[in-house]
Image (cartoon, rainbow, N blue to C red):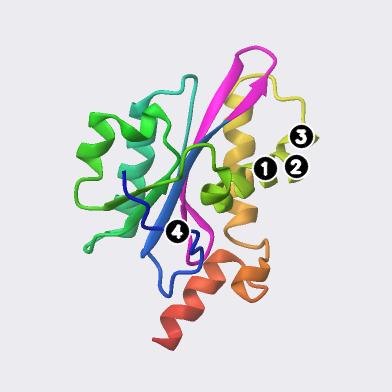
Amino acid sequence: MKKYLKRDFDPASPDATWCTDITYIWTYDDGFVYLTSVMDLFSRKIISWVLTKDMTAESVLEAIKIAQKRRNIRKPVIIHSDRGIQFTGELYKEITEKMKRSYSKKACPWDNACIESFHSLIKREWLNQYKIQNYEDAYKLIFEYIETIYNTVRIHSHCNYQSPNQYEKSYVKSN
């Protein structure tokens, strides 16, 4: 397993390096639901996400397919993840065959720090403020946070105090 990322969390352009991971979210009626997110490390933008009731490789693949379609990827990117079974199986290798797969070292969560930080942030800033009843409630809250706050208006020091969307637009204008 290769380690291309090497904690270089600051690529020079969009779609050079993506990072992906899964986190759990508690609901009162449905128990845990699972958020799979794909982040572009250039802008810290969540370029795709999927919420499921299980933690399967298929949900990871769905999130990556959505990211590839949204970003209209023509060149290979580095895609970084931990070594969970969802990211090391044959299905994952098939869907990412034209990408450079990068993996965290064993027992080293810092290699995946950016996406781990996002998952912590969505819980701390948003989800923990609500009693989430079920999958549908979780989906609505996650959609609202990612699509209408995090990517669009929440500023990031990494992005020169712009939102991820603004940061990417600034990059396009300057190039």
- Which numbered tag is attached to residue 124? 2
What residue did someone put label 3 on? Answer: 128
Quarter assignment of residue 140: top right
Q: On the picture, is 156 further left or further right than 35?
A: right
Residue 93 position, x and y percent, is 24, 38
Residue type at mark 2: give it.
Arg
Q: Measuring from the top left, give residue 161's x and y in whole percent.
A: 67, 73
Camera-nearest label, 4 or 1? 4
Within the magenta stretch, is there residue 156? Answer: no
**Residue 78 in the image: above or below residue 96:** below
Q: Are marks 4 and 3 in contact (CB under 8 Å)?
A: no
Determine the residue positioned at 65% across, 63% down. Answer: 153
* Magenta segment includes 41: yes
| Discs 2, 3 touching: Cβ within 8 Å | yes
- Frontmost of labels 4 and 3 is 4
User: Please, what secondary structure does the residue beneath circle 3 have?
Assistant: helix
Q: Which residue corresponds to the image point at 40% horizontal and 68% vertical from the top-left?
A: 14
Q: Nearer the viewer, mark 3 or mark 1?
A: 1
Q: Of tags 4 and 2, which is closer to the observer? A: 4
Task: State if disc 1 and disc 2 touch (CB < 8 Å).
Answer: yes
Tag 4 residue: 6
Q: Estimate the spatial distance between the alpha carbons at disc 4 and disc 2, rounded to whole Å.
A: 27 Å
Question: Answer yes or no: do the residues labelled 4 and 1 have beta carbons within 8 Å?
Answer: no
Q: Position of residue 130 (x, y in %)?
A: 77, 31
The residue sitting at the right extreme is 129
Distance between the Cα atoms at labels 2 and 3?
6 Å
